Image (cartoon, helix red, strand yellow):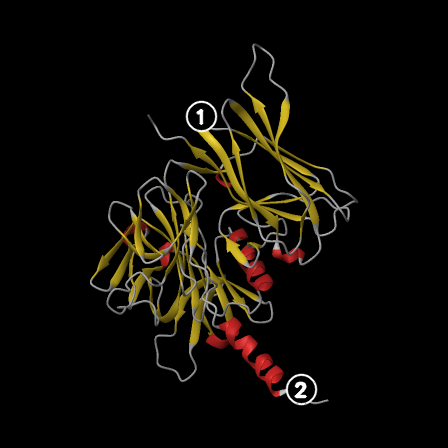
Amino acid sequence: MRFPAASLLALLLTPLQAWSQPAPPPSGVGHDGARIEGILQRLDQEGQLVLHQGGQPRVIKTGELAYWGRLAAASEGAWLLTNQGSRIVADVTAWNEGQVQVESRAWQPGTIPVASLRAIILQPPASAALQDTLLQRIREHAGEDDLLFLQGGDILRGGVLGTSQRREILPLIRIRIAGRAEEVRVPHSRVQAVAFRRPSKQAAGDSNARWVVGFRDGSRLSVESLRQQETRVHCLLEEGLELVRRPAPEGQAWRDVVYLRPLDNRTVYLSDREPLGYKHVPFLGASWPYHMDRSVTGGRLASGGVVYEKGIGMHSTSRLAFEVPENAGSFDAEIGLDDRAGLRGSVIFLVYCQQAMEGESPAGWEVLFQSDVVRGGELPQRVRVPLEGVRRLALVVQHADRGGVRDHANWLHARFTIKPAE
């Protein structure tokens, strides 16, 4: 069969035309629930964002932003995980017991104290599922030894001393195995990750952090400040640690910043609070716990091809209740099934609220929001529930079409938005 020349030309041009379509502009959400679109031009010292929208500058003032942009997948390089939750994607150029030296095409050479690190993933697994499994094992490590994760699943315990100080042809990782005086040297190519021991008094979180910042290379930092010097962006992390991006072309110093979330008192994330109670009624026999800032399977929160850093993973049929903070104006979230559900899974999201006490008896629960059936593969949708007079709130997930099959529900960026002080 022969195609007419015109039809063949149209067939060949169609994908090229599709590829040439401009990508949608980055977007975010304000505290008022309104969508915020625009390309980031800069972030000033007062915390104001300057975005370009339709060729015109738009200023987002301090206290108006919930979040902007989306996280990027980590590109080539090791992952350095800090005690305060940052992920630095860079190459490890030197490493001893006290400090690690890093640099990459994105970061200028810098030094990170080993005491500030929770782990170094030298060779991240290729699949997201295996990455999540490794991260979970690192989070669960609470022993007194460092752990050396080897390719193939073996683990060495002891005190990691860094890379060999000699200039061997084959790079080596040095570790003093527990109970032995001599060092063991392991080829760098065999080591997947190192999890450092964490003193019992060490706690996660950083009260001085003002922003969570995502970069195009997959780095995600909790920073005290961001400042521009010429065409470089300086990032001040915990304990005085500073990282500097490499110089960018004139006027593009902020081009690699793809995500911003302010840490302020206008937003209270439900995943940062202790719930009042949780109840799960399995459709069959398997029970599912909820997870804070992770999907119900324990992996990253991902819906519609986008990874989210904040949220709650739940399974049908379950209920998770919270006390509502004073002066909370609304509950805000994006709802959807986790990408691991594929095209399966179908749930109904509901938000129940209990009004403030009436005399000595608590008020009853009422439904303030109920979604249509949400199915796997659909894009997340936004939810905003006013909370005037509400004392308690419950997130409920019910099964829909197929019982409880793959009902991996995500409450993404689930948060209480606090009304501004008058």
Q: Residue furthest toward the bottom?
A: 2
- Residue lying at 59% horizontally and 84% vertically, measured from the top left: 6
SS for tag 1? loop
**Residue where numbered disc 1 is placed:** 326
Q: Is any part of residue 29 visible from this angle?
A: yes
* Placement of 15 over or under 144, stated as above or below: below
**Residue type beneath disc 2:** Phe
Picture coordinates of residue 10, whole percent (x, y): 58, 80
Q: Quadrant of residue 2?
A: bottom right
**Residue where numbered disc 2 is placed:** 3
Picture coordinates of residue 190, whole percent (x, y): 52, 74
- Residue lying at 33% horizontally and 63% vertically, measured from the top left: 255
- Residue lying at 55% horizontally and 62% vertically, measured from the top left: 131
Q: Nearer the viewer, residue 160 or 391?
A: 391
The residues bearing labels 1 and 2 have C-alpha atoms spaced at a distance of: 69 Å
Q: Residue furthest toward the right?
A: 284
Q: Residues within 10 Å of mark 2 (few under 14, many from 20)?
A: few
Left or right: 295 in relation to 30:
right
SS for tag 2? loop
